[in-house]
Image (cartoon, rainbow, N blue to C red):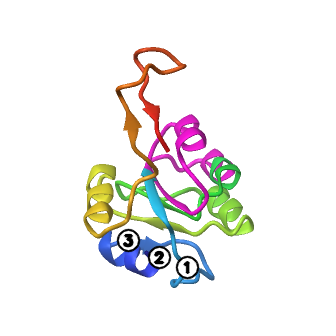
Amino acid sequence: MTLEEIAKLLDAEIISRDVDPTQSVAMACGADLMSDVLTFTHAGTLLLTGLTNPQVIRTADTAGISAIVFVRGKYPPPETIALAEEMNIPLLRSRYTMYECCGRLYKAGLPSCGLFDFSAPCQQGAQTACPTA
């Protein structure tokens, strides 16, 4: 799915300058815990988050995130925008909640980052879901 299609589906504003609207993303993940982003995402992922600090950009760069959508109408501070532009990570914002954004993208055919296997015991403990992919 392209950033242009995503922006249309989410009624989103593209915040970053010099964004290629034809840039594609392979999957999406909604998360506010950056440890989850590092654990469960893959290169080519669209991240949906309510966090707007520069650490989100650093984490996204480390995880190979293709683009970020800030949910709930949040607008990032100038230092976050500058860092994202320096790292070539497009930023968008949507007025919808994370739940609504994820649902709209999933309904349109954009897959999530993976499924979880509840049948096998998890290394981290019984309370934690273990990804299968």
Q: How far apart are marks 2 and 1 (CA)?
A: 6 Å
Query: Foreground: 39 or 131?
Result: 131
Q: Nearer the viewer, residue 46 or 82?
A: 46
Question: What residue lies at 35% left-to-right and 28% top-to-bottom?
Answer: 118
Could you tell me how far apart the alpha carbons at marks 2 and 3 are, in whole angstroms?
10 Å
Q: Do the residues labelled 3 and 1 touch (CB within 8 Å)?
A: no
Amino acid type at circle 3 is Ala
x and y percentages locating residue 103 in the rendered image? 26, 57
Residue 66 falls in image quadrant? bottom right
20 relative to 92, above or below: below
SS for tag 2? helix
Crowd around label 1: few <14 · some 14–19 · many ≥20 (10 Å): some
**Residue identified by numbered label 3:** 12
Could you tell me if the residues under marks 2 and 1 are in contact, i.e. CB atoms within 8 Å? yes
Give coordinates of residue 96: x percent, y percent.
29, 59
Image quarter (top left, top right, bottom left or bottom right) of the N terminus: bottom left
Classify mark 1: helix, strand or loop: loop
Q: CB of mark 2 within 8 Å of CB of mark 3?
A: no
CA gap between label 3 and label 1 equals 15 Å
View extreme (top): residue: 126
Residue with the mark numbered 1: 23
Q: Which residue lies furthest to the front in this view?
A: 120
Q: Which residue is drawn at 53% across and 50% down?
A: 52
- According to the image, label 2 marks what residue? 3
Badge 3: residue crowd in 10 Å (few <14, some 14–19, many ≥20)? many
Looking at the image, residue 57 sits to the left or right of residue 68; the answer is right
The disc label shown at residue 113, or none: none
Q: Does the magenta stretch include residue 35?
A: yes
Assess whether residue 10 is covered by the magenta stretch. no
Q: Which amino acid does label 1 sit on?
A: Gln
Q: Quadrant of residue 110?
A: bottom left
